[in-house]
């Protein structure tokens, strides 16, 4: 006769995430939360996220109203941001932001420059996310940092020549606020490269990942907020 509990079944336990209790999928969220009054590009309209119908006030349900630029928080730029005839965000091929991606760490305090990225042997069709000092500075905190790390014009030309598919950066723009913002966007978007801006790569080591980044499907828009995730390979 078996004692109670003597016959052990194989464990069916899976790794669970501490917070949610759900099985961990290995995906890491690299997008920032959109919140009322959060940091934004100085010339863009403010980000307003307000409860306009509120159960706290006796209403029967909650409803939030959003008002912001399409380039708020973590977002993607479409070619039509800088080209009249360029594709809009709703026409983006899903392969632009879903698939293998490489996180490259940049040491320079000012620029992503050619000298630093050349040794990484960037190839045609790659999706490259640049982890810069912007991530260690917790860029989402105010005030807006006019000196954030961004692409040099030469590096933008280099990436265009390499025909990468997509690039991502850990600040609100691939180009600098006080210098080359127009030129860098012009070079990259004219080359048909898709752009993810406003990433949080602070917890991400350089290396190879699966990437999923899906911008909201806003008809004819030059950009859209996005949720971005990576999973180490
Ligand atoms: Zn943008």
Image: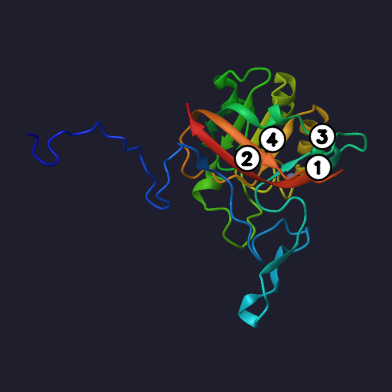
- Residue placed most toward the observer, 14 or 27: 14
| Mark 2, other Cα within 10 Å: few <14 / some 14–19 / many ≥20 | many
- Distance from Cα at disc 3 to Cα at disc 2: 22 Å
- Relative image position of residue 61 (x, y in whole percent): 66, 71
The reply, left or right, for residue 7 in relation to residue 211 is left
* Residue on which the image places disc 2: 169
- Nearer the camera: disc 3 or disc 4: 3
Q: Is mark 1 within 8 Å of ligand 1?
A: no
Secondary element at image label 3: helix
Q: Are marks 2 and 1 in contact (CB under 8 Å)?
A: no
Label 4, label 2: how many angstroms apart (C-alpha)? 13 Å
Sequence-first tag of 3 and 2: 3
Residue 49 shows up from this direction: no
Dot 4 or dot 2: first in sequence order is 4
Q: Are marks 4 and 1 in contact (CB under 8 Å)?
A: no
Ranked by sequence position, the earlier of labels 2 and 1 is 2
Dividing the picture into quarters, in which one does residue 16 lie?
A: top left
Residue in view at x 66 percent, y 66 percent: 36
Residue at the disc numbered 4: 152
Q: Earlier in the sequence, mark 3 or mark 4?
A: 3
Residue 7: image quadrant is top left
Residues under labels 2 and 1: Cα distance? 16 Å
Which mark, residue 64?
Answer: none
Give the residue at mark 1.
182
Mark with earlier residue (1, 3): 3
Confirm if mark 3 falls within 8 A of ligand 1: no
**Furthest-front residue in view?**
1
Q: CA distance from mark 1 to mark 3?
A: 23 Å
Tag 3 residue: 91
């Amino acid at each position: 006769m078996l004692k109670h509990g003597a016959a052990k079944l194989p464990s069916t336990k899976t790794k669970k995430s501490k917070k949610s209790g759900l099985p961990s999928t290995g995906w890491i969220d690299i997008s920032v939360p959109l919140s009322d009054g959060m940091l934004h590009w100085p010339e863009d309209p403010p980000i307003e996220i307000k409860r306009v119908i509120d159960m706290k006030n006796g209403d029967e349900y909650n409803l939030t109203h959003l008002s912001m630029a399409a380039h708020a928080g973590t977002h993607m730029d479409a070619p039509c941001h800088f080209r009249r005839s360029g594709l809009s965000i709703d026409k983006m091929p899903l392969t632009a932001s879903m698939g293998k991606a490489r996180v490259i760490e940049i040491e320079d305090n000012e620029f992503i420059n050619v000298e630093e990225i050349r040794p990484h042997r960037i190839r045609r069709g790659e999706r490259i996310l640049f982890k810069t000092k912007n991530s260690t500075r917790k860029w989402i905190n105010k005030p807006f940092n006019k000196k954030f790390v961004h692409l040099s014009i030469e590096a933008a030309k280099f990436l265009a020549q390499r025909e990468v598919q997509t690039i991502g950066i850990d600040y609100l723009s691939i180009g600098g606020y006080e210098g080359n913002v127009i030129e860098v966007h012009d070079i990259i978007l004219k080359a048909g490269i898709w752009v993810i801006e406003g990433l949080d790569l602070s917890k991400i080591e350089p290396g190879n990942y699966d990437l999923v980044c899906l911008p909201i499907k806003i008809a004819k828009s030059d950009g859209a907020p996005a949720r971005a995730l990576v999973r180490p390979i």
